[in-house]
Image (cartoon, rainbow, N blue to C red):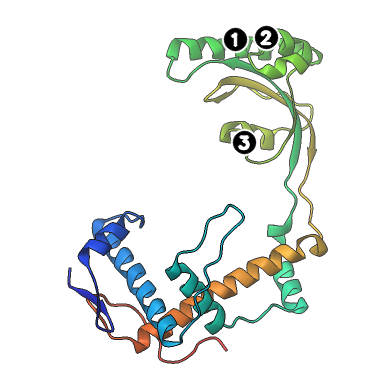
Amino acid sequence: MSAVSVNGVSISRKAIAAEVQNTPARTPAEGWFAAARALVVRELLLQEAQRLAIPLDPQGDADGRRETHEEALIRALLAQEVRTPVADEDTLRRFYDNNRRRFMSAPLWQAEHILCAARRDDAAAFAAARAKAEALAAALTAAPERFADLARTQSDCPSAAVGGSLGQITPGDTTLEFEAALRSLEPGVISAPVETRYGVHLIRVNRYVEGRPVPFEAVRKEIAAYLADHVSRSAEAQYIALLVGRADIKGIALDGADSPLVQ
């Protein structure tokens, strides 16, 4: 680990070691590099703020937290020096048209289930739950109209009180195994026993509504905010690369640039 400095200002090994605690990494070497890079970039920005005589104006948030002097200087420097274009209407529309799959409403299931509860780490209990679910499945094959009644009397889920109804379900609301069963079922069909970490389920989908395109007008602000954030991050990274390219940095190799990349 070579001594690290930025334009003659040393960054101590102690400071880098402390920064490593805030830098997730797969290996100690990666952690050291990421921490050292973060401190080098901060020092570069603070030196540039001092060179440009950026005024110090710490701001606070709604929770009463205030910026440190360093945070305030870096924020003001980037606000002054980094210029980012604002996406026009054509750009927003083009992004929407090119990413239609991102702007779909979630599919929705109206479903009900019967749960035979058991923990997977209790082999005997789980086997009993599986046997109970198989017996209920056989009964429902003969009389599917009994689903709600059997849910009320046999299910171990609080939904038993409403005949097993789970209301409306969207992706991510249930376990992966349960959701896979939902996706495979036609409305009105009762599943074979489905095993999850909660036990063994019998599931019936009563209604399925496919995801639908969300109108451009409903996501216009979301797209504008996403593009603004993306462009801002890119512009800030390029500005930092310019500072790196002009600086005398020792002890760590960083990629720099010698001319502006964003106009």
Residue for badge 1: 132
- Whether residue 251 is situated above or below residue 127 in the rendered picture: below
Helix, strand or loop status at disc 1: helix
Residue farthest toward the left in the current orientation of the protein: 2
Q: Residue flagged by tag 2: what amino acid is it? A: Gln
How far separated are the C-alphas under marks 2 and 3? 23 Å
Q: Residue flagged by tag 1: what amino acid is it? A: Lys
Q: Can you give x and y, in whole percent of width and height, for residue 6 in the image? A: 29, 80
Query: What residue appears at the point 58 percent right and 52 percent down from the top-left corner?
Result: 63
**Res. 98 image quadrant:** bottom right
Please tell me which residue lies in front, 77 or 201: 77
Residue for badge 3: 180
**Mark 1 vs 2: CB contact within 8 A:** yes
| Horizontal side, residue 157 vs residue 142: left or right | left
Neighbours of disc 2 within 10 Å: few (<14), some (14-19), many (20+)? some
Q: Can you give x and y, in whole percent of width and height, for residue 108 in the image? A: 75, 40
